[in-house]
Image (cartoon, rainbow, N blue to C red):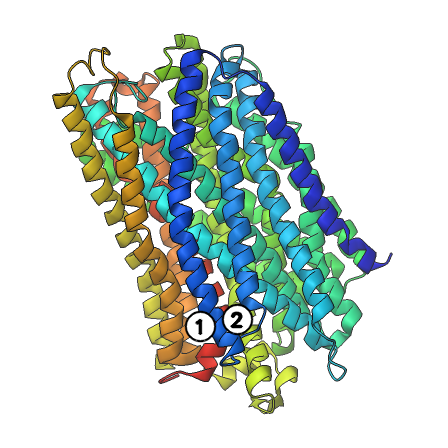
Amino acid sequence: MDYNVLFWFVPAASLLALTFAWYFYRQMKKESEGTERMAYIAEAVRKGAMAYLKQQYKVVTIVFVSLALIFAIMAYVFKIQNEWVPFAFLTGGLFSGLSGFLGMKTATYASARTANAARSSMNSGLRMAFRSGAVMGLVVVGLGLLDISVWYLILDSFIPADINDTGMKLCIITTTMLTFGMGASTQALFARVGGGIYTKAADVGADLVGKTEYNIPEDDPRNPATIADNVGDNVGDVAGMGADLYESYCGSILSSAALGAAAFAADGSAMQTKAVFAPMLIAAIGIVLSIIGIFSVRTKENADIKSLIGALSRGTNLSSLLIVAATFAILYMLGIENWIGLSLAVVVGLLVGIVIGRSTEYYTSQSYAPTRKVSEAGKTGPATVIISGMGLGMLSTAIPVLSVVVGIILSYLLATGFELGAEHVSLGLYGIAIASVGMLSTLGITLATDAYGPIADNAGGNAEMSGLEPEVRRRTDALDSLGNTTAATGKGFAIGSAALTALALLASYIEEIRIALERTNPDVLINGKPLMSANIVDFMHYYDVTLMNPMVLCGIFVGAMMSFLFCGLTMNAVGRAAQKMVAEVRRQFSEIKGILEGKTEPDYSRCVEISTRGAQQEMILPSLLAIAAPILTGVVLGVPGVIGLLIGSLSSGFLLAVFLANAGGAWDNAKKYVEEGNFGGKGSDTHKATVVGDTVGDPCKDTSGPSLNILIKLMSMVAIVMAGLTLAFNLIG
């Protein structure tokens, strides 16, 4: 089969994903929002979410235009940058933002409809929330592959083939395509940080005052912060998450393509092209199989949490099993070297993702002992809840780290045929990169299970505020509890894929250095070899990338510091915004008569305004710091320092992200377990203690933790884009 013909399956699959996303959206819109009160609440949340995104995109647009102008000056004035970078950067940001916007728009329309569907049955509510979440999943993978395929066609048309080195063209194309990943990562970080600050400021304010001080239920319409809390679920866990996983998805495919171009450069253009197409085709078939998995998700009435998890797992497991068979078929049809080993590397990536997901489920679901022990710790007060949750989070890092380590080793060895020589390093790294593609190949359905969570959460809020019958609230609570677990699992999955992708991006950085040198100093010898003949090990020797080089060591320390500095900034940002929210909620309870009696409606808009302003002000510094760190490190410490920075941020960021996500998820579900009637139930001292634990965990799992996986990839992307500047000007390295 002609592999060039196979490529057209990539844009076709992207259009198929977008078609089904439109279909699920239209099916959802046909359903009723329920009562007039339910529609009113949904409209208030929708308006608040759209108003926030409008303000966020104004800020982000200014940042993007400024950065694009800088890239244009570097490319067209100083000639140290690829001239396509400014345009690729803008399209990456555009599609990332669009993914989040479309997903959030769907979620804000779906929440009331999910609550209304739950009035008839549990299965109806699950189906409505899940298929609405599937819109997010399919939009992300559809737009991602569409962006990739269009850029490949554009660059393939405009970049002329080098008659002396035919392998050079694909190396330039793939490294150039990597640069639109910086745009996606930049937009994703603003979306995650801003959305995380927004939602947690509202959530903390609503819980600390409403639950602990006034003993009113969650999502009670008397709480002034309730609408802001529901808005936050959408801007943080839907829009932010969509932008986040868009850049993860694209980053894994593009880094694999870049490493494939480098690894097979000496084998002729045909084999090199096959290696570039392989990750795209695996992702494309993953879309088709994700759609099949989506249609397989259903459950029975009166299902418990384990049954609900099983219903969602059925779809993801089916898609995963089918992608294994499809991968073998794709790589065989391509005729790629060592297709069996590379296919097994994809399987390894899938297995690592499953292990991380199951580990996260075990440590964060109230169906298992660890989270129940956190609940029990509430019997002795908030302090022991916090201690227990922190210990759980630390312990939970072991399995994800070990699984990633095993995954890296196995995928490397499988790709090289169990060879460890320097000449096989590029091929081994290609195996690691394609393993990350395997992990994210079924993102269409994996993200659907993640986006389902905030929709179910908002449905529960709508049911409570609308005064629906207790049975409906029981069903939405069950769906919401499931959503907490799927969200935690999704975050674990995202950070696991980030670890593999960031490692691949680190290798891609070396390839970008090669391209930059070709543009500025083509006659340089790398470890005694011509530039295009040198492998990654040669570059390591040339730049003295060893632990004995102080530039590398300094870079590692700075990179490790960045994870903690970033978390400190985002945690404090949530704290400051939450303080304002707490003060406002207390003010309204004390000054506006009749709120607690349900005779007067609170001033919801004031709380929405506080969260919006706080998020807009606080998201800028952490996001710009993530962009500035690789640039400044490169200017001061050169290439060795940048490599050290990326290693340090990857190692510390991965561990810290897993710890924060799992500790936060456990604290949240520990509270839910008590609210189900255990250890005294709602209103008990144990419940109040677990509410405090949940409040501490909120910024951990929804702001700082999920932002870290973007941080480590964004710094890699910035380093790649700024490779030309690092080579042209550095003080020490």
Q: Nearer the viewer, residue 358 or 74?
A: 74
Question: Badge 1 local density, few (<14 within 10 Å), some, or many (20+)?
Answer: many
Question: Badge 2 local density, few (<14 within 10 Å), some, or many (20+)?
Answer: many
Q: Position of residue 7 (x, y in %)?
A: 76, 55
Q: Amino acid at mark 1?
A: Ile
Which quadrant of the figure has residue 140? Answer: top right
Q: Is residue 417 visible?
A: no
Labels in figure, total: 2
Q: Give yes or no for contact between labels 1 and 2 (Cβ–Cβ under 8 Å).
A: yes
Check the image and report above or below for 319 versus 539. Answer: above
Q: Position of residue 679 (x, y in %)?
A: 27, 20
Check the image and report above or below for 73 versus 624. Answer: below
The nearer-to-camera label among 1 and 2 is 2
* In this rendering, position of residue 7 left or right of residue 482: right
Instruction: Name the residue tied to disc 1.
Output: 643
Query: Looking at the image, which residue is at 61% across and 85% down?
Result: 531
The residue most toward the top is 469
- The circle on residue 509 is 2
Query: Looking at the image, which residue is at 81% across and 61% down?
Result: 335
* In this rendering, position of residue 714 left or right of residue 522: left
Q: Position of residue 96 (x, y in %)?
A: 52, 49
Q: Position of residue 82 (x, y in %)?
A: 57, 73
Q: Secondary structure at mark 2?
A: helix
Q: Amino acid at mark 2?
A: Tyr
- Name the N-terminal-most of marks 1 and 2: 2
Q: Quadrant of the N terminus?
A: bottom right
Q: Secondary structure at mark 1?
A: helix
The residue most toward the right is 1
Q: Quadrant of the C terminus?
A: bottom left
